[in-house]
Image (cartoon, rainbow, N blue to C red):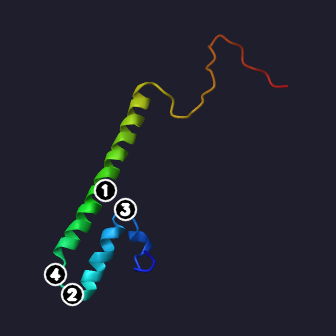
């Protein structure tokens, strides 16, 4: 990928499709109608990647909501509450 000069931001699971797309773009002087098959394959891969990440995030959110609805704590530890009849603690 370094040899093909793919920027770090674009080195994801679809980078293998970006390399031939960029080669086609350079060869065809960036004419938008020339590299349709390559562009379509790359954009489809990116779309599927985003959908997969959204599905994972939705599952994480559902698990968190289930944990909150189940009465589990959110990470706060509260001291036990004393009854109003109890004498106040004295410091020495």
Query: Spatial distance from mark 1 to mark 2, Cα to Cα?
Result: 29 Å
Q: Quadrant of residue 64?
A: top left
**Residue 50 circle label:** 1
Q: Earlier in the sequence, mark 3 or mark 1?
A: 3
Q: Quadrant of the N terminus?
A: bottom left
Q: Residue 11: percent from the left, percent from the top?
A: 41, 68
Q: Earlier in the sequence, mark 2 or mark 3?
A: 3
**Residue 13 circle label:** 3
**Pointer 4: what residue?**
34
Label 3–label 1 contact, CB within 8 A:
no
Query: In this rendering, which labeled residue sits more in front, label 1 or label 2?
Result: 2
Q: Residues within 10 Å of mark 4 (few under 14, many from 20)?
A: some
Query: Spatial distance from mark 2 to mark 4, Cα to Cα?
Result: 7 Å
Query: In this rendering, which labeled residue sits more in front, label 3 or label 1?
Result: 3
Q: Earlier in the sequence, mark 2 or mark 4?
A: 2
**Pointer 2: what residue?**
28
Label 3–label 4 contact, CB within 8 A:
no
Query: Spatial distance from mark 1 to mark 4, Cα to Cα?
Result: 26 Å
Label 2–label 4 contact, CB within 8 A:
yes
């Amino acid at each position: 990928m370094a040899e093909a000069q793919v920027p770090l931001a674009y080195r994801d699971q679809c980078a293998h499709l970006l390399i031939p797309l960029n080669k086609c773009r350079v060869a065809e002087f960036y004419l938008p109608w020339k590299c349709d098959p390559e562009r379509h394959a790359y954009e489809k891969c990116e779309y599927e990647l985003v959908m997969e990440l959204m599905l994972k995030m939705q599952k994480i959110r559902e698990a968190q909501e289930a944990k909150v609805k189940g009465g589990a704590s959110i990470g706060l530890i509260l001291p036990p509450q004393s009854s109003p009849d109890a004498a106040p603690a004295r410091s020495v």
